[in-house]
Amino acid sequence: MTTLYDALGGEQGIRRIVDAFYRRVAEDPILKPIFPDDLTETARRQFLFFSQFFGGPALYSAEFGSPMLRARHLKFPISPRRAERWLKLMGEAFDEAGIDPLTKELAFARLTKTAMHMVNIPDEEENNSDAPRGRINVQRAEL
Ligand code: HEM
């Protein structure tokens, strides 16, 4: 049985996806404000994480321990709109990296669930960095 990691092209494929994704984040008006200006370390961590998330070597946990992704995202105001944008840019990155449609669909079933799980504020509080964070009932067709 092959893994999604292999179907994505292993290390090289995941590097292409992450690179294409953060090039887009750097230009995106609704995501850029919550990311650091220098995305080098963010992209490196995303690469380590994707490697294990898709069934390859557990590089992220080897360096940082348990991913606890929701907890690590709580300090950032993540609205449904930001989650949708994250998924849209990631979709474009998969296309730029030349990932085949079936592999993309399988990967996105997992990415969509994880992105929904990160949402912690309603759209209206997107620009309020003091907004209380909690679970949001995301019921949008796109998610
Ligand atoms: C739902 C929309 C999402 C938004 C708006 C978002 C935003 C962010 C931000 C702002 C950071 C911190 C960047 C930094 O300080 O360097 C981050 C880190 C990270 N994100 Fe996301 N993220 C989202 C979804 C996801 C998803 C779906 C995944 C995985 C499938 C993911 C994986 C990661 C990882 C692995 C890190 C690095 C964590 C660390 O070691 O600190 N994110 N994200």
Image (spheres, rainbow, N blue to C red):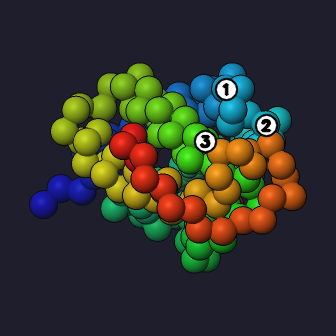
Badge 3 crowding class, 10 Å Cα cut-off, few under 14, some 14 to 19, many 20 or more, is some
Report the side of 15 relative to 120 (left or right). Answer: left
- Residue at the disc numbered 1: 28
The amino acid type found where label 1 is placed reads: Asp
- Please determine whether, in this image, residue 2 is positioned above or below residue 15: below
Badge 3 marks a residue whose secondary structure is: helix
Q: Is mark 2 within 8 Å of ligand 1?
A: no
Report the side of 38 relative to 116 (left or right). Answer: right
The amino acid type found where label 3 is placed reads: Arg
Badge 1 crowding class, 10 Å Cα cut-off, few under 14, some 14 to 19, many 20 or more, is some
Cα–Cα span, label 2 and label 1: 9 Å
Quadrant where the N terminus sits is: bottom left
Cα–Cα span, label 1 and label 3: 10 Å
Q: Nearer the viewer, mark 1 or mark 3?
A: 3
Coordinates of residue 113 in the picture (x, y in percent): 40, 58
Q: Is mark 3 within 8 Å of ligand 1?
A: yes
State the residue lying farthest toward the bottom. 66
Identified at 64% across, 31% down, the residue is: 25
Report the side of 8 relative to 113 (left or right). Answer: left
Q: Nearer the viewer, mark 2 or mark 3?
A: 3
The amino acid type found where label 2 is placed reads: Pro
Badge 2 marks a residue whose secondary structure is: helix
- Disc 2, disc 3: CB below 8 Å? no
- Residue at the disc numbered 2: 33
Work out whether mark 2 precedes mark 3 in sequence or the reverse, and give the earlier one.
2
Residue 45 is at least partly visible in this image: no
Cα–Cα span, label 2 and label 3: 11 Å
- Residue at the disc numbered 3: 82
